[in-house]
Image (cartoon, grey):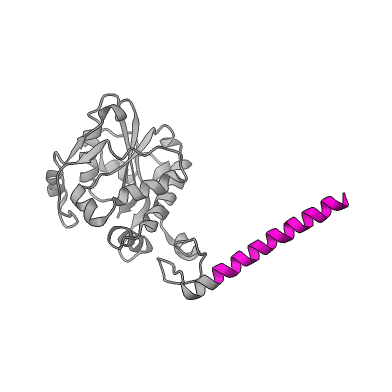
């Protein structure tokens, strides 16, 4: 018994020592390579966190994922047959969320997408409405735009989602065949007109008889998501839901 006690004492002392050394190394690296909150810029945060607790708390959750007939679902009323639709957060200008999305789309900060995907995935994971989803699909980018950016931001968000919600990603069954300019400043009619025949299905058998969850970063008029959803729903037996990180008020 004495030998066992000595063994465990040495083991826990060794474990404590390793933890202490690891803490010192992290503090030392933080001194020369400071890690800042992407929201407010403070360096008072864990080395593996993207946002400080204050900024993380300030992300405005919508609770749409748990509620039917929410504003995102109403966007598609009379336009397309979807099972469920939701967004995790409200988007407002000059907000922490806007800064994260800008970092993801224009500053090559893929960790911002992983973080936002995890937050969305955590909400999906506890929502009974999305339980029967078979797979998730990131909204495709045109190959030229994806090459220019270096990645598809919706795919990065999906990577974050599946790290906390056990669903497969299908990222090669839907193709964006036409390049479209940014639609940020266009009205709903022009957005819808621009998106006609933009998407095609390259592997219909992969989608057949599945409930697909289509993922994007922000939803405004829903024209792009509608066009992609319409292409997917042409496949026999396919059901479709939609989820985004943000909903524009």
**Would you say the magenta stretch is mainly helix, strand or loop?**
helix
221 left or right, relative to 8: left
Residue 148 seen anywhere in this rendered image of the structure: yes
Give the vertical position of 203 relative to 122 (above or below). above
Q: Quadrant of residue 19?
A: bottom right
Q: Is residue 18 magenta?
A: yes
| Residue sticking out furthest to the right | 2
Nearer to the camera, 44 or 8: 8
| Residue sticking out furthest to the bottom | 31
Horizontal and vertical percent position of residue 164: 47, 45
Give the vertical position of 197 relative to 88 (above or below). above
Give the vertical position of 71 relative to 47 (above or below). above
Horizontal and vertical percent position of residue 185: 16, 57
Nearer to the camera, 83 or 40: 40
Horizontal and vertical percent position of residue 184: 19, 56
Give the vertical position of 145 relative to 86 (above or below). below
Which residue is at 28% across, 42% downward?
Answer: 74
The region drawn magenta spans 1-27
Horizontal and vertical percent position of residue 9: 78, 57
Q: Quadrant of the C terminus?
A: bottom left
């Amino acid at each position: 018994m004495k030998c066992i006690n000595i063994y465990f004492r040495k083991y826990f002392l060794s474990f404590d020592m390793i933890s202490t050394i690891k803490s010192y190394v992290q503090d030392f690296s933080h001194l020369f390579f400071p890690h800042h909150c992407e929201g407010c810029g403070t360096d008072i945060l864990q080395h593996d966190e993207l946002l400080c607790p204050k900024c993380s708390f300030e992300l405005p959750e919508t609770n749409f994922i748990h509620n039917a007939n929410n504003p995102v679902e109403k966007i598609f009323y009379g336009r397309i047959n979807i099972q469920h639709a939701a967004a995790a957060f409200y988007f407002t200008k000059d907000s922490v969320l806007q800064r994260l999305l800008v970092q993801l789309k224009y500053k090559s900060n893929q960790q911002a997408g992983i973080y936002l995907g995890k937050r969305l995935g955590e909400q999906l994971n506890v929502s009974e409405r999305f339980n029967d989803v078979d797979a998730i699909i990131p909204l495709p980018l045109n190959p030229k735009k994806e090459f220019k950016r270096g990645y598809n931001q919706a795919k990065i968000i999906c990577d974050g989602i599946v790290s906390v919600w056990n669903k497969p990603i299908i990222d090669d069954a839907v193709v964006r065949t036409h390049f479209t300019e940014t639609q940020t400043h266009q009205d709903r009619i022009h957005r819808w007109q621009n998106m006609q025949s933009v998407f095609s299905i390259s592997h219909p058998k992969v989608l057949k008889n599945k409930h697909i969850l289509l993922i994007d970063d922000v939803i405004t008029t829903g024209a792009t998501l509608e066009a992609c959803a319409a292409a997917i729903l042409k496949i026999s037996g396919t059901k479709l839901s939609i989820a985004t990180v943000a909903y524009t008020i």
